């Protein structure tokens, strides 16, 4: 059973170099969990916007298999309402896709996906810009992957100029006005606005960037871990063994 590293122990408390290395390792471990969570969220969005129903294929079953299935099911309890609801939902999804089903459950969800995607992009970019954690460097994460580095820079631009600071023109609210029947000019603060520009098509590209980050973090965590263990003094090793033995 693993135990938390005793950073306040006298064998470690004054070793600032080691504590800084442990802090860097903890940052990488935290980032690896963040990458996992962002990837799972993106996959959920992709399932909604990209899901294409699989055509139903009917294959004739052998007569003996049909009879065997009838025998197995003859004593089965009658389907509950939950069973019927589940079958209906899965049939709808198979026939028309996830988006079609969710339109019944949450009609506003589709319009909210851009906001959800924006949050994921911001969370992704935080790992490259955070001052509280050891930031990732794109030259390391995307080493030898120039095409993917260009994708990362495109996502970074959208985060900086659209989601974070609203510097891009598309999606910005603007002043509108109208002239009434008497020729009077009135500002229409609630008038029609510019159509929001959606970036959900970047989901597959961002997933590729996250997979590259996952690969880099896995290697970097192992390298940092090996370096820490390999440079422990004998006193520090003994302290860790004694700490591990404690109930």
Image (tube, rainbow, N blue to C red):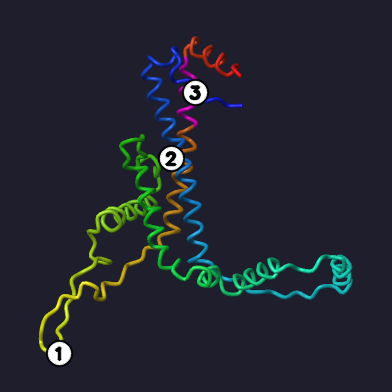
85 or 38, nearer to the observer: 85
* Between marks 2 and 1 in the image, the one whose residue lies nearer the viewer: 1
Q: Earlier in the sequence, mark 2 or mark 1?
A: 2
| Picture coordinates of residue 125, whole percent (x, y) | 35, 47
Identify the magenta region.
222-232
Give the class, few, some or many, for how many residues have Cα within 10 Å of label 2's Cα (few <14, many ≥20). many
Q: Which residue is mark 3?
A: 5
Helix, strand or loop at label 3? It is loop
Q: Which residue is mark 1?
A: 181
| Image position of 17 with respect to 175: above or below | above
- The residue sitting at 47% across, 12% down in the picture is 233
- The residue sitting at 59% across, 17% down in the picture is 246
| Picture coordinates of residue 109, whole percent (x, y) | 45, 66
In the picture, the disc for residue 200 is none
* Between marks 3 and 1 in the image, the one whose residue lies nearer the viewer: 1
Q: Which residue is mark 2?
A: 31
């Amino acid at each position: 059973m693993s135990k938390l590293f005793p950073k306040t122990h006298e064998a470690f408390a004054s070793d600032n170099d080691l504590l800084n290395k442990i802090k860097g390792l903890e940052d990488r471990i935290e980032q690896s969990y963040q990458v996992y969570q962002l990837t799972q969220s993106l996959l959920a969005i992709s399932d909604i916007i990209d899901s294409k129903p699989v055509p139903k294929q009917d294959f004739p079953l052998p007569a003996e298999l049909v009879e065997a299935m009838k025998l197995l099911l003859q004593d089965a309890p009658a389907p509950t309402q939950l069973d019927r609801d589940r079958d209906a939902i899965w049939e709808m999804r198979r026939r028309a896709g996830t988006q079609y089903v969710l339109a019944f459950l949450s009609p506003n969800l589709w319009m909210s996906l851009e906001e959800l995607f924006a949050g994921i992009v911001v969370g992704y970019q935080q790992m490259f810009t955070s001052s509280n954690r050891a930031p990732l460097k794109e030259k390391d994460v995307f080493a030898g992957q120039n095409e993917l580095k260009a994708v990362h820079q495109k996502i970074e631009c959208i985060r900086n100029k659209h989601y974070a600071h609203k510097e891009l023109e598309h999606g910005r609210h603007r002043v509108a006005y109208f002239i009434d029947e008497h020729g009077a000019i009135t500002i229409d603060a609630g008038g029609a606005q510019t159509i929001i520009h959606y970036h959900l098509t970047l989901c597959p590209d961002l997933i590729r960037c996250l997979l590259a980050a996952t690969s880099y973090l896995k290697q970097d965590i192992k390298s940092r871990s090996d370096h820490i263990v390999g440079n422990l003094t004998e006193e520090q090793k003994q302290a860790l063994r004694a700490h591990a033995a404690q109930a």
